[in-house]
Image: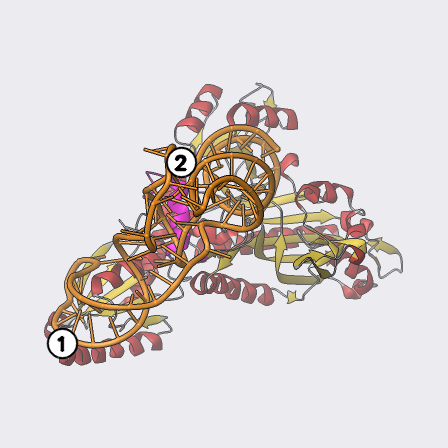
Amino acid sequence: MSRLITSRSKDPNAWYSDLVKHAGLVSKSSVRGCMVINPYGFSIWERIQQILDLRLKETGHQNAYFPLMIPLSHFEKELSHVEGFAKECAVVTHHRLCERDKQIKIDPASELEEALVLRPTSETTIWNTYRDWIQSYRDLPLLINQWANVIRWEMRTRPFLRSTEFLWQEGHTAHATQEEAQTETLDLLDIYVDLVENTLAIPVVKGIKTESERFAGAVETYCLEALMHDGKALQLGTSHFLGQNFAKAFDVKFAKQDGRLEYVWGSSWGVSTRLMGALIMVHGDDKGLVLPPKLAPQQVVIVPIYYDEEQRKEVCTQAQRFQSAWEKQGLRVHLDDRDLHKPGWKFAEWELKGVPLRVAIGPADIKNQSIELFRRDRLEKISVSWEGVNVLGLLDEIQHNMFQTAKERQQKHTHITDDYDEFKEILSQKGGFLSAHWDGTTETEAQIQQETQATIRCIPLSQNPKEGKCIRTQKKSSQRVLFAKAY
RNA sequence: CGGGGUGUGGCGCAGUCCGGUUAGCGUACCUGGUUUGGGACCAGGGGGUCGCAGGUUCGAAUCCUGCCACCCCGACCA
C-alpha cells in the first residue's frame, strides 16, 4: 500500500481524496468546490476529449463556442428548465471594482441592468441562437457540439464527481422530424457507451430516466449508469430528447418543403469530467490510480536500474532501443532516467499514477537478454526475453482484463429481487444495482427513496420487458427497473 | 441549511487547557558526497506577519470578543 494513500477499506472518502491529490490529478483551489486540474489529470481528460471529439466529427457534428454568461431573461422562457437549475446558479450582478479604505470592494454604481447567469448548461443560449440560424429544412439537421466549462452551485462537492465548476462537452442538435431527433438522441447514447466501455473500460447500463430524474426541459432523458466500487451508482452521461420544447420556448421554426412552418425537434447530450471520477472509483486501488491503456497518457514506463555510471549508460541505451521500437508501434512510452530517485521510489510513483505497464531493465536483464514487466491491473511481475516481449498484445490484454473485471463486479453486485425486505437488506449491506418491479408512479418512487435512499437509476433499454408486481405496492408493473443508491 | 471539526513554513502535524528565552517535529525543497533490483543515507542550508480584526497584559500561537475560510456527516445534482 502506498504510504500516501489511506486504504479504501479504512476510509473510502479519504482514499478518494488522497488518490486524486497524490496521483497528481488535482490541486485544491481557493474557491469552494472548484479544483485545479493538474497537468497529469488534464492529460487524461485531453485523451478523453480527443477520442470523443474525433468520433463526434466522424458522425457529422461540428464544434462551436457559446458565451459563458446568459441573460437572466433567457431562463424565463422554458419554465421547467429554470426550475431544474434555479437553486444552483451563480449570478453576475456587477461589472466593476473600486478601492475604498484600502480595500477592494464591488462598485455599487456598476450594477447591471440585467443580471447574467453563469451557464449551468447552454440550452437557453444555444436555442436563442438557433432561432437566427435556422430558417429552412435545408438548414437541418444542425449538429453542434461545444467543449466548455459550466457552473452548478452544488451544496456538497468532490473533485471530478461533483464540482462547482466542471468541464464537459454539450451537444445540441436540431432536426426536421421527431424520428430524426430521437435517432440522434439514441445514437449519441451509443457513442457514449462505446467511449466508456471500450476506452475507459467501465461497464454501463443504458436506460431511460423516470419522470422525476428527467432533465429539466426534456421529453425523455437517456443515461449511462455505472456501478462504483462501494456499491453506489454513478451517472456517466446523458442524452436528452427535447421534443419541440426549446423550439417553442425560443421560437425556432423552419420552413418545410411545402412552405409550411414547423417547430424544430431537438436533442442535447453531454459527458463531463465526472468520467475522471468514475475511472478512479471503478479501477483505482490502495496503490493509486489504474488507467486503461487506451486512455493512459503514458502506457509504458521504463525504469532503468544500474549500480554505476558505466552500467547506467549500457542500461539506458538498451532502454532507449525498446522505447523507440515501441513508439514505432504507436505506443506512448516514457523512459524515467531521472537519477534523483531510486528504482523503488519510481515503482511506487508510477503505480500511484496508474501507468498500465512498467518495464524494469537492469544489469541482470542485459546479461540474460530479458526485461521485467509489471502489470498495474493485476500487480503481477513477469520476466520475459527480448525476443518474446509483446507489449502491444499485453496492453490489449490489460485493457480487456480491466473491463472484464469491472463487468464481473457489476454483475456480481446486480441483484434481482421481488421482496421488499430483501431489497432493503441488500441495500443496507452491500449496495449495488437492484433490479425490481415498480408500479410506474412518482409517488411510489419517492416512497422507496425515502425508505431506502435508493432511487431508480434507469429503466434499462436492453431487456425483454416482463410484467410483474411492484416491489413496494404490489400493483401491476410492466417491467423491472434498476434501483441503487447514487452519487 | 442543520450537526461536528480544523485553521501554525509547500504538505502533514505538535505546542493552546495552565501566557514567558530565538515557535518545534516529520516530510518536501536547495548544496555537496556516498548510494540505486520495491519509497536510501550523512553533512550543511533556505523557508513562518501562528486564518483575519480588535481587546486584556510588562509580555499573546496560547486568554477574551467579533469575523472569515475550509473539511467531514445528513436533504439536491453530470
Label 1 neighbour load within 10 Å: few <14, some 14-19, many 20+: few
- Picture quadrant where residue A389 is located: bottom left
Q: Secondary structure at mark 1?
A: loop
Mark 1, residue position = A308
Task: Determine if the magenta segment contains residue A21.
Answer: yes
Front: mark 1 or 2: 1
Query: What subunit carries mark 1?
Result: A
- Picture quadrant where residue B20 is located: top left
Residue drawn at x 48%, y 46% is: A204
- Residue A225: image x %, image y %? 51, 43
Q: CA distance from mark 1 to mark 2?
A: 52 Å
- Picture quadrant where residue A348 is located: bottom left
The amino acid type found where label 1 is placed reads Asp
Residue A441 is at least partly visible in this image: no
Mark 2, residue position = A413
- Residue B27: image x %, image y %? 28, 57
Task: Determine if the magenta segment contains residue A340.
Answer: no
Residue drawn at x 65%, y 35% is: A212
Which residue range is magenta in the image? A6-26
Query: What subunit carries mark 2?
Result: A
Q: How is the image coloured?
A: secondary structure
Residue A317 is at least partly visible in this image: yes
The amino acid type found where label 2 is placed reads His
Q: How many marks?
A: 2
Residue drawn at x 16%, y 71% is: A362
